């Protein structure tokens, strides 16, 4: 089982403690070609997902049909603004599903997102374009009922 963390911004950039590795970071919009669109985005940045989203605003704009799988830590995201507003900005017109430990998907309504994602745990969410073929492809994994209020996922 892997794991990792990212130091809080403001820490000395050149300070590397024993057992750690310093890496350069770059905005995704600066790395991919200007006209590039993508089909799938997976983001797990140890609480810094809002910064990743900010650094890929161009890719998101050019990829309205991209599915997004994202780790959400409400408490960690709060350092960068309102976590639900950040998620809504990334969601756009996509349908939202809570990903359970068993891989099942529970539909999330806009009104429900804030109540389902618990502040003390990390949740995983699928943001899926509203395209019939994609919805049909995941249908066997979707629970009929929406996610329960306050569902805690690790």
Image (tube, rainbow, N blue to C red):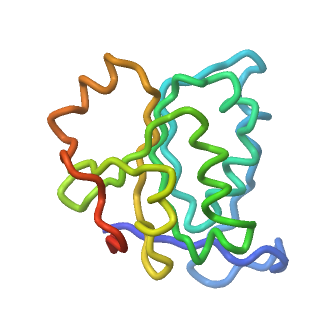
Residue 68 image position (x, y, % from top left): 49, 39
Residue placed most toward the observer, 44 or 57: 57
Q: Which residue corresponds to the image point at 29% horizontal and 53% vertical from the top-left?
A: 146
Please state if 141 lies on the left or on the right of 16 as rendered: left
Residue 86, image quadrant: bottom right
Residue 90 image position (x, y, % from top left): 62, 44
Please state if 2 lies on the left or on the right of 37 as rendered: left
Quadrant including the N terminus: bottom left
Q: Which residue corresponds to the image point at 74% horizontal and 67% vertical from the top-left?
A: 80
Residue 91 image position (x, y, % from top left): 57, 42
Instruction: Check the image and report above or below for 135 versus 56.
Output: above
User: Residue farthest to the front?
Assistant: 111
Residue 123, image quadrant: bottom left
Q: How many marks?
A: 0
Q: Which residue corresponds to the image point at 19% horizontal and 41% vertical from the top-left?
A: 141
Query: Taking the image as drawn, is residue 154 in sight?
Result: no
Residue 58 image position (x, y, % from top left): 75, 31
Q: Which residue corresponds to the image point at 56% horizontal and 79% vertical from the top-left?
A: 19
Instruction: Check the image and report above or below for 101 versus 67.
Output: below
Residue placed most toward the observer, 3 or 148: 148
Quadrant including the C terminus: bottom left
């Amino acid at each position: 089982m892997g794991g990792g963390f990212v130091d809080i911004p403001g820490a000395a950039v050149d300070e590397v403690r024993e057992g750690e590795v310093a890496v350069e970071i770059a905005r995704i919009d600066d790395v991919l070609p200007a006209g590039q669109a993508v089909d799938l985005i997976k983001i797990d940045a140890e609480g810094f997902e809002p910064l990743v989203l900010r650094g890929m605003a161009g890719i998101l704009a050019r990829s309205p049909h991209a599915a997004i799988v994202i780790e959400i830590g409400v408490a960690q995201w709060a350092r960068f603004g309102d976590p639900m507003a950040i998620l809504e900005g990334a969601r756009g017109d996509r349908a939202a599903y809570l990903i359970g430990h068993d891989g099942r998907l529970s539909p999330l309504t806009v009104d429900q997102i804030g109540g389902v994602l618990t502040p003390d745990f990390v949740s995983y969410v699928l943001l899926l374009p509203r395209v019939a073929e994609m919805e049909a492809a995941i249908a066997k994994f979707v629970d009929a009922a929406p996610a329960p209020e306050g569902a805690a996922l690790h």
